Image: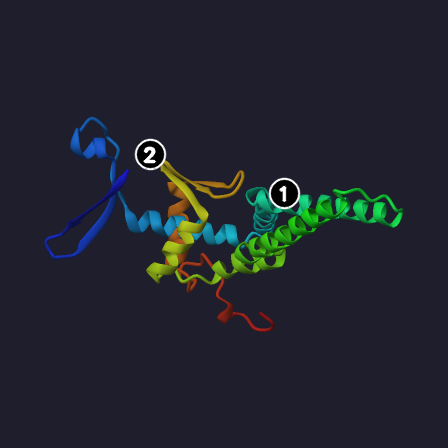
Amino acid sequence: MSGVSGTSSTGTKHRYYHCFVAKKKKTCDKKRISKTFIGTVVVDYTMQMLNDTKIVNQIVDNCFKLQTKENASLPAMESRLIQTQKEIDNVMNAIKQGIITPSTKSTLEQLEHEKENLEIAITKEQIERPTLSKEQIKYWICKFRFANADIEEQKKRLIDVFINAIYVYDDKVLVTFNCKDGEICATFDEINEMLTQKENADNSNGYQRSPLNKFGDP
């Protein structure tokens, strides 16, 4: 489904998602769906996901592990540095024991030069691609809990970071997140109930309890 828009007789612009085949070839009976409706559903369920501590911790753990998997060059250089230092130590031990050959000096110089280059390369890699701690990753993810869905830029960033794909069926919406096994499937009845509660946040229809009507600690 792709984005389409139309202007009503009052001049108001309405935006939808519409099946290309249904619109152009008329061979699909899939109905168009409001962009605002989809956006509200996606943002609301994403915010619910971000407030689930168990899911957030899973995301943090996966992100932390992914850093070392994606940056394969750094572990390789660190491993080679350890090996180079061992080889330098072996040469130095041989010198201490009086085992000196014509190539000893050149071998040691080559190893020292390689060690220096490796240390420089590792430092450069660490500066360009720093490894984040779990606490730093969790802090960054949890900042999205305070995203304002009424601000288009914040809403777009929330979707770009966490949403993988959205599937719209005749009776439900499936939202898949950018994390392993991360998906939420909600029927239109469940979504409409959720939207009804949002519209009656002041508890006018008894859907939600307002903290302003209670005394004592929040």
- Residue furthest toward the left? 9
Amino acid bearing label 1: Ala
> Which residue in the rendered view is the most extreme toward the right?
97
Q: Quadrant of the C terminus?
A: bottom right
Tell me residue 212's x, y (percent). 49, 71
Q: Give the spatial CA distance, label 2 vs label 1.
A: 51 Å
Marks 2, 1: nearer the viewer: 1
Quadrant position of residue 150: bottom left
Q: Pointer 1: residues within 10 angstroms few (<14), some, or many (20+)?
A: few
Label 1 sits on residue: 76
Q: Which residue is mark 2?
A: 170
Give the numbered dot on residue 112: none
- Residue at 45% x, 56% y: name it: 207
* Numbered disc total: 2
The amino acid on which the numbered mark 2 sits, given as a three-letter code, is: Asp
- Secondary structure beneath label 1: helix
* Residue 57 drawn at (x, y percent): 61, 50
Residue at the image position 56 percent from the left and 73 percent from the top: 215
Image quadrant where residue 72 sits: top right
Q: Observer-nearest residue: 86 or 95?
A: 95
Whether residue 131 is visible to the viewer of this picture, yes or no, is no
Image x and y of residue 37, in percent: 32, 49
At horizontal 45% and vertical 48% (from top left) the residue drawn is: 162
